[in-house]
Image (tube, coloured by chain):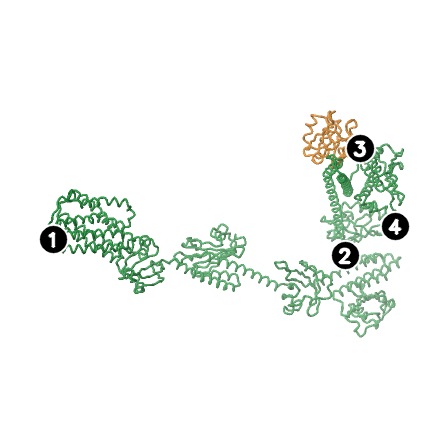
Chain colours: A green, B orange
């Protein structure tokens, strides 16, 4: 083997070495996806270059042939490895399965085998020779048939791979695109070289030059672009889809890569920015490039404005190192944090708004006047919380009607429109707000109104003014869309505002009410006192101060007892305290003492005030000064007293008492009337006043004649014809020391004037100090003195009439005069007084009578019959009564009857009627009547109540009767089964079982007896017990009784006898069942209480109209003192016996009542130890008449 | 020898059961109408020796039934013992019934009454 030098050989060898180096380098990084394929490719190229270099260097044909054939190992495999590398590089290696790769290798393998054996068959090369090219020689060949498929196959894969790589360039940018371009150039060059060689443009195969370039390209690709280190695979999947923008800058500050998110952020496509410097790319934001120009690391938030919107980003700058920790670039990561920033800003503004709301509340709380409050509410809310326009609408309690509206415009102009009582139930804005959940609502776009005209569109919020339990109104805020952004918490804010204002309004309204109330209390015409629970005064109103003289400061802390006087009975205070401590209101009258000691009367109502827990915390007293009322009332009372005295005296006069009695009466009445214990009446006799009547037994006074020097005051009254009043007689220097006991203080002397003359003096005196006569008392006494004069005059005249009976004419005249005076008296009387003739026709009626009956004038009634005014149903009775009185000439009677007023109303009167006689002849009557209607009503009410009580008792008894009936059915069951048990119907019983069954039977019978007796008693009490009247045979009755009792007697070892008297009728009428009951009860008792001997029943005829049933026994007898007791309900004589012989204790009582119902009597003869005999005496009844 | 038949018309089950046993014990065969709606069928088929009749019944009035029995030629002679808790009712029907027993009606009382009302029935006797 000989070689010769050629410069081509050196180049080719160099290329082979470089390729081999690439192969080794790639193999060392075989974990990277495309590295193994690259290693294989480079290895194949190295083999090809190496062999070709030796072929050229070969000096003889054999050598050239050998290396030329060996070169085919590389030639045949390069396209395949290139294809595999391309697929890997384009991330499509998953298409390569092992069988697929084996298939790919079939053709190259055949080519290699044919190449190595070509001189035997000539399929690849038909001939070969040394072709001298001048400076070098190559192996010349004439190609055989296989060369064509080999050639096509190789180019197919080379071109396919080239296409794959070219296509991937379109998808890649920057860094990787450069890399790929290098690769394509690297592979196209040898292809071109090969084509040139194959098409025989050159005798030298240029392919190895191309391959040298390929290896150079690959080397550059590896070193320049780090072909294998940065795997495009990861980058694709991670970066492309990242939300954060990522921009890679190389060390020249040029953009090496940019992901779609970053492209979107800077609004540029990758193609435009890759390769540009950062300054160019970020030109719109010069401050950023300046800020970050020389920094390799940073983390900052930046704000970029765009179309009036602010966008916030977090910008992170980090350095990019290669393996040798040398910085090769920077990575910019950009994250959009606008949302977060906005939320933060919104939170800040929310806090600000909350503070504003708080301040608003504080400020509004200072305002008390409600109108101002409402206006300030919207004005301040608009100002502080920044809505364009606001409206505040107040509604009534049912939220149906508007009670007032307040609005504030965009310009801050306040409008107060009082739309009272406008119905809002069909206003959908209002309704939506009032019914909004959480009391607030937001409309995003709504028409904005002004005076019912739409003036724009905007968003609105509304909220209920919520006072905690209902809406007192609502708020509406309008906002023009163009003007203001919505806060994210608008609804919450307005809801909060609505709540705040609602509660505030509620509170302010309550305060206003309290202010009004307290103004009312302050201005109240009544005294008001508020004390705490223990009675200490906490408040008094000005009226209290005015009335009592105690100021609020003086009264506070005191007990109302400071006002207490002795005039109010202790009982009243006790009752007051009892009432209010029970939690009830007390009302009543109290006499209190003012600060200056003056007494006054109050009508007060005192009520306890309880807190929510029901505890009394305060008492409030509202009191009215009724001193004036009370004194008026007292005066009225005295007036009435006066009238009644008048009346009495009138009656006295009518009764024609003698003058002395009259005088005595006058003095006594006067004393009562004026509350004066001392009184006397003196009549004038010439120059003396003669004491004629007096009080306080002082007989030495009687007939005392006093002249002017002794009784100066009385004579003064006589002379002046005016009352003489002295407040303190004892202190007067001229007083007479003539009375026993206490000295006189207040005295009064009243002249008694008849006609024109003063005929005497009425003198009154009080011994109590400091108790002067009141003016109205004096007035009363003056009238009374006039009355006394009248009466005395009348009496005197009457006396004269008697004395001068002959002077008939004169007397008659005087009588007429007297009649006139009489009238004067009776006209004023409080009782009705009238007179009628003998036929009962009115001849006179006084005003009181007319007033009672509703007549206005006497003429309306005069001539009418008295009976006409009597209530119709009473006329006959009253007529009979008075006819009787007249017939028997009874002087005076009292009768009560109802009379009819003209308006139909009835009044009851009680009247004293005196007959008027002329000799023996009754000529008429006169009556003094009194209104007793109230009394009668009370009596009627009482009688009604009694009737109702009786009815209730009857109903109760009926109920008892019904219950007794209902008891009978279950009793039947008990009795029946007990008897069946007892008679061993259900099988044999042992002794104690039998005894028990017997006990049940006994108990049931006893219970039954009780039910029967209770029922009977109930019927008797309710008066519903009816007795039948039927024919019965006494013998049969006795037989039935014997059937029941005989056995009992026999069991007790007693003899039982019955006897019927022969004269007793064979048949009688009556209620046989009840008679049987009576006999069984009596005979049953007899058997019960008799231990030995006999019991007998004897029916006998007593007389023509009566028969009797006698039940006798030989028992222990009943003591005499118990004879009456045994007929009372629930009585038995001896308790010891009771224990043995149980019963309700009603039996004898019922028996007695039955006997009495039958019109009979029951009697008892018994002595202790002698036995007892009960006798029932009954009438013999006849057959009742058959009713038609 | 056939036993005499007793018809018991009584709605309170505890009472009808007692009457039933009480009468069976003294030699009756019994048939019960507990509501007052079956007695017609029973009477159509047989003529009982005695009828025990309650006045308060859910579907009929005892007084009505008694009138019906007395009005029927075929049944009029049957002795009827009326039981009731109501004294007034008892008095109202007393003339038509052979015996009126005021409740509670004990076994013994019922048996005594029935035996007394049927003196011609030889087989009736109370076990001792």
Q: Which residue is mark 1?
A: A136
For discs 3 and 4, the disc positioned in front in the rendered view: 3
- Can I make out residue A570 in this image? yes
Q: A1140 or A751: which is nearer to us?
A: A1140
Element under label 3?
Answer: loop
Q: Residue at x 59, y 61 (%)?
A: A517
Both on one chain, marks 3 and 4?
yes
Element under label 1?
Answer: loop
Q: Is residue A688 above or below residue A107?
A: below
Ranked by sequence position, the earlier of labels 1 and 3 is 1
Q: Which residue is mark 4?
A: A920
**Mark 2 crowd level (few <14, some 14–19, many ≥20, 10 Å Cα):** some
Q: Is residue A1075 above or below residue A847?
A: above
Where does the C terminus of chain A fall, quadrant-wise? top right
Q: Give yes or no for contact between labels 2 and 4 (Cβ–Cβ under 8 Å).
A: no
Ranked by sequence position, the earlier of labels 1 and 4 is 1
Q: Is residue A441 left or right of residue A56?
A: right
Q: Which residue is mark 3?
A: A1186
Both on one chain, marks 2 and 3?
yes
Picture coordinates of residue A1152, whole percent (x, y): 83, 42
Q: A338 or B22: which is nearer to us?
A: B22
Ranked by sequence position, the earlier of labels 2 and 1 is 1
Q: Which residue is mark 2?
A: A830
Q: Chain of mark 3?
A: A
């Amino acid at each position: 083997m000989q070689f010769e030098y050629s410069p081509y050989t050196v180049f080719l060898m160099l290329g082979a070495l470089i390729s081999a180096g690439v192969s080794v380098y790639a193999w060392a990084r075989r974990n990277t996806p495309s590295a193994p394929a690259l290693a294989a490719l480079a290895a194949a190229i190295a083999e090809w270059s190496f062999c070709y270099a030796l072929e050229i260097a070969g000096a003889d044909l054999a050598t050239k042939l050998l290396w030329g054939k060996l070169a085919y190992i590389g030639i045949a495999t390069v396209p395949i490895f290139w294809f595999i590398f391309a697929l890997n590089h384009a991330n499509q290696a998953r298409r390569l399965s092992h069988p697929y790769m084996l298939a790919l290798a079939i053709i190259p393998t055949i080519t290699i085998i044919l190449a190595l054996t070509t001189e035997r068959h000539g399929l690849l090369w038909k001939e070969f020779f040394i072709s001298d090219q001048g400076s070098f020689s190559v192996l010349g060949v004439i190609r055989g048939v296989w060369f064509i498929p080999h050639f096509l196959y190789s180019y197919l894969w080379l071109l396919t791979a080239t296409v794959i790589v070219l296509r991937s360039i379109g998808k890649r940018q920057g860094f990787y695109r450069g890399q790929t371009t290098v690769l394509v150039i690297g592979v196209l060059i040898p292809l071109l070289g090969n084509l040139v060689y194959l098409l025989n443009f050159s005798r030298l195969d240029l392919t190895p030059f191309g391959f040298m370039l390929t290896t150079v390209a690959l080397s550059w690709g590896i070193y320049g672009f780090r072909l294998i280190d940065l795997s495009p695979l990861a980058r694709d999947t991670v970066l492309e889809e990242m939300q954060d923008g990522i921009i890679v800058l190389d060390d020249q500050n040029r953009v090496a890569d940019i992901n779609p998110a970053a492209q979107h952020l800077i609004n540029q496509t990758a193609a435009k920015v890759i390769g540009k410097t950062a300054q160019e790319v970020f030109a719109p934001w010069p401050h950023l490039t300046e800020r970050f120009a020389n920094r390799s690391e940073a983390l900052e938030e930046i704000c970029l404005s765009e179309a009036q919107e602010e966008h916030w980003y977090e910008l992170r700058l980090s350095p990019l190192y290669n393996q040798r920790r040398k910085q090769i670039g920077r990575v910019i990561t950009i994250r959009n944090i606008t949302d977060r920033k906005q939320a933060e800003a919104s939170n800040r503004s929310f806090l600000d708004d909350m503070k504003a709301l708080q301040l608003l509340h504080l400020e509004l709380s200072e305002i008390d006047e409600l109108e101002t409050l409402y206006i300030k509410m919207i004005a301040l809310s608009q100002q502080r919380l920044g809505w364009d326009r606001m409206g505040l609408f107040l509604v009534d309690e049912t939220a149906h009607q508007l009670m007032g509206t307040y609005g504030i415009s965009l310009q801050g102009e306040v409008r107060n429109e009082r739309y009272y009582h406008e119905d809002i139930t069909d206003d959908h804005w209002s309704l939506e707000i009032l019914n909004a959940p959480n009391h607030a609502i937001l409309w995003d776009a709504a028409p904005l109104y002004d005076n019912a005209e739409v003036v724009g569109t905007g968003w609105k919020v509304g909220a209920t003014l919520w006072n905690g339990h209902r809406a007192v109104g609502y708020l509406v805020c309008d906002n023009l869309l163009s003007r203001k952004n919505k806060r994210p918490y608008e609804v919450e804010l307005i809801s909060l505002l609505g709540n705040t204002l609602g509660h505030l309004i509620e509170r302010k309204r309550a305060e206003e009410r309290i202010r009004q109330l307290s103004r009312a209390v302050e201005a109240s015409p009544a005294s008001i006192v508020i004390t705490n629970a223990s009675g200490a005064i906490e408040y008094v109103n000005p009226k209290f101060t005015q009335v009592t003289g105690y100021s609020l400061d003086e009264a506070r802390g005191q007990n109302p007892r400071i006002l207490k006087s002795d005039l109010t009975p202790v009982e009243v205070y006790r009752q007051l305290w009892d009432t209010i401590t029970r939690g009830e209101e007390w009302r009543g009258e109290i006499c209190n003492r003012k600060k200056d000691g003056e007494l006054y009367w109050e009508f007060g109502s005192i009520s306890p005030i309880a807190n929510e827990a029901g505890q009394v915390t305060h008492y409030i007293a509202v009191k009215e000064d009724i001193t004036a009322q009370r004194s008026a009332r007292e005066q009225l009372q005295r007036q009435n007293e006066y009238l009644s005295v008048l009346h009495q005296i009138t009656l006295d006069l009518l009764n024609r008492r003698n003058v002395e009695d009259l005088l005595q009466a006058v003095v006594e009445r006067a004393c009562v009337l004026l509350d004066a214990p001392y009184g006397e009446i003196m009549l004038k006799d010439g120059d003396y006043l003669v004491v004629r009547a007096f009080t306080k037994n002082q007989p030495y006074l009687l007939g005392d004649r006093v002249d002017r020097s002794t009784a100066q005051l009385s004579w003064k009254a006589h002379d002046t014809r005016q009352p003489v009043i002295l407040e303190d007689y004892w202190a007067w220097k001229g007083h007479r020391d003539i009375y026993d006991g206490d000295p006189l203080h207040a005295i009064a002397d009243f002249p008694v004037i008849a006609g024109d003359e003063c005929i005497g003096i009425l003198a009154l005196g009080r011994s109590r100090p400091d108790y002067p006569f009141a003016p109205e008392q004096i007035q009363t006494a003056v009238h009374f003195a006039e009355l006394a004069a009248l009466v005395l005059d009348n009496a005197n005249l009457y006396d004269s009439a008697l004395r001068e009976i002959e002077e008939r004419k004169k007397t008659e005249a005087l009588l007429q005069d007297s009649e006139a005076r009489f009238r004067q008296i009776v006209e004023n009387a409080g009782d009705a007084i009238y007179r009628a003739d003998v036929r009962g026709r009115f001849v006179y009626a006084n005003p009181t009578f007319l007033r009672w009956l509703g007549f206005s004038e006497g003429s309306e009634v005069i001539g009418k019959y008295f009976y006409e005014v009597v209530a119709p149903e009473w006329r006959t009775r009253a007529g009979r009564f008075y006819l009787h009185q007249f017939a028997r000439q009874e002087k005076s009677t009292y009768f009560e009857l109802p009379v009819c007023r003209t308006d139909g109303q009835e009044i009851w009167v009680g009247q004293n009627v005196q007959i008027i006689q002329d000799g023996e002849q009754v000529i008429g009557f006169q009556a003094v009547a009194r209104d007793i209607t109230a009394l009668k009503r009370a009596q009627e009410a009482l009688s009604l109540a009694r009737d109702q009580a009786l009815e209730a008792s009857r109903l109760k008894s009926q109920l008892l009767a019904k219950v007794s009936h209902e008891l009978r059915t279950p009793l039947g069951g008990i009795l029946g089964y007990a008897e069946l048990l007892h008679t061993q119907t259900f099988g044999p019983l042992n002794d104690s079982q039998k005894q028990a069954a017997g006990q049940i039977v006994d108990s049931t019978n006893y219970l039954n007896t009780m039910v029967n007796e209770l029922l009977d008693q109930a019927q008797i009490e309710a008066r519903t017990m009816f007795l039948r009247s039927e024919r019965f045979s006494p013998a049969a009755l006795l037989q039935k009784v014997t059937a029941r009792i005989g056995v009992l007697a026999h069991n007790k070892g007693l003899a039982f006898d019955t006897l019927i008297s022969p004269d007793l009728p064979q048949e009688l009428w009556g209620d046989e069942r009840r008679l049987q009951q009576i006999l069984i009860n009596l005979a049953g008792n007899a058997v019960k209480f008799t231990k030995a001997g006999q019991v007998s029943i004897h029916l006998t005829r007593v007389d023509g109209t009566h028969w009797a049933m006698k039940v006798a026994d030989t028992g222990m007898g009943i003591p005499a003192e118990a004879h009456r007791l045994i007929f009372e309900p629930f009585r038995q004589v001896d308790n010891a016996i009771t224990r043995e012989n149980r019963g309700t204790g009603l039996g004898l009582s019922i028996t007695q009542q039955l006997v009495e119902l039958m019109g009979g009597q029951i009697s008892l003869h018994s002595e202790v130890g002698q036995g007892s005999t009960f006798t029932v005496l009954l009438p013999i009844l006849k057959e009742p008449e058959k009713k038609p | 020898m056939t036993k005499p038949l007793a018809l018991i018309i009584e709605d309170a089950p505890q009472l009808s059961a007692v009457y039933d046993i009480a009468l069976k014990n003294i030699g009756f065969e019994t048939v019960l109408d507990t509501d007052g709606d079956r007695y017609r069928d029973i009477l159509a088929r047989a003529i009982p020796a005695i009828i025990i009749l309650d006045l308060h019944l859910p579907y009929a009035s005892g007084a009505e039934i008694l009138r019906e029995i007395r009005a029927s030629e075929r049944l009029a002679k049957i002795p009827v013992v009326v039981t009731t808790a109501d004294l007034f009712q008892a008095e109202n029907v007393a003339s038509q019934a052979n015996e009126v027993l005021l409740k509670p009606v004990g076994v013994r009382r019922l048996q005594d009454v029935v035996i007394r009302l049927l003196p011609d029935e030889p087989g009736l006797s109370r076990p001792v």
